[in-house]
Amino acid sequence: MRISVILPAFNEEAGIGPTLRTLTGNADDNIEIIVAANGCTDRTAEVARSFGVRVVEVGAPSKTAALNAADEVATGDVRVYLDADVPADPGVLRRLADEVNRPGIEAAVPRPAVDTSASTWPVRAFYAVNSRLPVFRGRLFGRGIIAVSSHARSRFVRFPEITADDMFLDAVVPDGEKAEIDVPVRVVAPRTAGDLIRRVARARDGNAEFERYLRAHPEVVATPATADPASWLRDVVLRRPWLLPSAVVYVTVVLLAERTRRSASWDVRSGWGRPAVPVPRQRTPADPVPARDTP
């Protein structure tokens, strides 16, 4: 069983090295890695090539364009869509592929483990509530890594030009065909409250865009996720009263994020990728790569 890892990257020069080092640390001829550098103004493509992986360059800074370009050249029976900052070793990829190969299972994800160790207290408070929301249970989004079978991938021709590609995949695959393996994947939380507000604003903007897409294309999806606006209170805080102070932070962040995304100056790409910065030139996969500044 051949696995195609599709990794879109926008200005990830400083962060893509550790991810590729983990992916290529235990070589497997049945795993192909395709980095789709899209709209980069830094050395993302050059750093990726130094690891011996296939690199596809896309002129537009579009994750959707990157996914589609990489899909066109992928040869695997299983597609693994991976964010550039998510550490996943070949063992995790094989576990996901084995799960997808089970009868009746068409998509699989690992268990998310939100890392707030480098975050300020408002960020930790927000995730104390957010990570417990039931909307994430049994879904494919929120991990930064999704494995789908060739059968599930054949259900659509191209990723639509929307921000929430993970929600699109989640909606394409019916609930009974999804699985979560008991392997944690580290999801790095934003570092500051400002970073968090921008991330939540992007997520809410993507959710609203996806809802518009569903209304326009109801035939495309099987089971879209539906979030209950009161779930944070009913399903999380009322069952854990000690989270009430965190709930105040959670609601404040959501309100500020909503105001941010509705402002005239809002750009949904705000904060995506990394600005081009001078870093030590990397010539081989063994050379050190500067640690990524956690968003």
Image: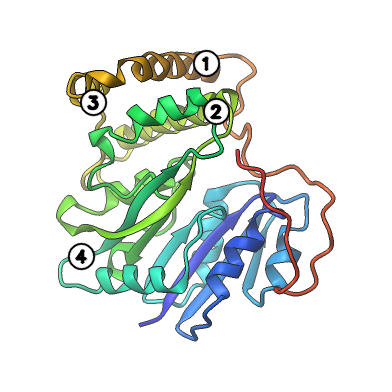
Q: Residue at x 80, y 72 (%)?
A: 283
The Cα atoms of the two marked residues, 2 and 3, are separated by: 22 Å
Badge 3 amino acid: Val
Q: Nearer the viewer, residue 251 or 244?
A: 244
Secondary structure beneath disc 3?
A: helix
Tag of residue 262: 1
Badge 1 amino acid: Arg
What residue is disc 2 on?
120
Instruction: Please identify, in this view, whether the residue under mark 4 or under mark 2 is nearer the observer.
Output: 2
Asked whether the beta carbons under mark 2 and mark 3 sit within 8 Å of each other, the answer is: no
Tag of residue 191: none
Q: Quadrant of residue 52?
A: bottom right
Q: Nearer the viewer, residue 54 or 95?
A: 95
The Cα atoms of the two marked residues, 2 and 1, are separated by: 25 Å
Secondary structure beneath disc 1?
A: loop
What residue is disc 3 on?
236
